[in-house]
Amino acid sequence: MSDTPEPLLPPAAPPAAPPAAPPAAPPAAPHPTPTQSESEPKVGVVTSADERDGVLVVGLTGDVTLDVSPQLRQGLLTLVEEHPHMAFVLDVTDVGFLSSSGIAVLVEVHKRLDKAACRVALAAPSQRVRRLLEIVKLDKLFCMYETVDEAVRGRGDGHEG
């Protein structure tokens, strides 16, 4: 017999390999690039300016946001410079949204025209735009009419049509 005692435990097994990583997920499919009409609303711009019965009818369209307010401001102030003694009717039929910066542009146009004793009226505001102007009490500053024809007949005289 040998003088070396036998180990009580069997020899340790070699360390096991780390568990295999789960298979890698396939790369995500790239997101389709939305078209402009899907990703961005229409921008607020001056689309027309026509004189009717001594009133300048200015068509606006789209969403008047912070990004487009400078463009709208420039367009409207240019018209004010070209027609400094005319009442303005802003046809907002196709304006879906009016941000605070858009409101500021309208107030600035009003102030410029008011110095010449002219008025600014809004024609055909959506319920959303009308409600916003009422909330901030600007329905007292701007005459609002249901149609462009009513606004032209009213000539921004301070009475709602």
Image: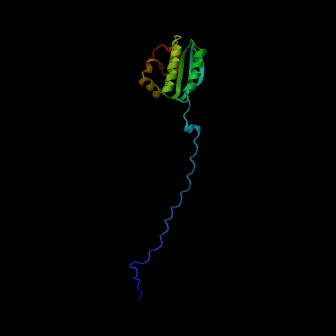
The residue drawn where x is 57% and y is 13% is 84
Residue 133 picture quarter:
top left
Q: How is the image coloured?
A: rainbow
Residue found at the far bottom of this picture: 1
Q: Nearer the viewer, residue 12 or 131?
A: 12
Percent position of residue 28, x then y: 55, 52
How many numbered discs, if any?
0
Q: Is residue 3 visible?
A: yes
With respect to residue 20, does 83 lie above or below?
above
At which x and y percent is residue 132?
44, 26
Residue shown at the point (50%, 68%) measured from the top left: 17
Q: In this orientation, which residue lies closer to the viewer: 143 or 98?
A: 98
Where residue 123 appears, as percent x and y from the top left, is: 51, 21
Q: In what quadrant of the picture does the N terminus appear?
A: bottom left
Tell me: 21 left or right of 135.
right
Residue that sits furthest to the front in the current view: 3
Among the 4 quarters of the image, the one containing residue 59: top right
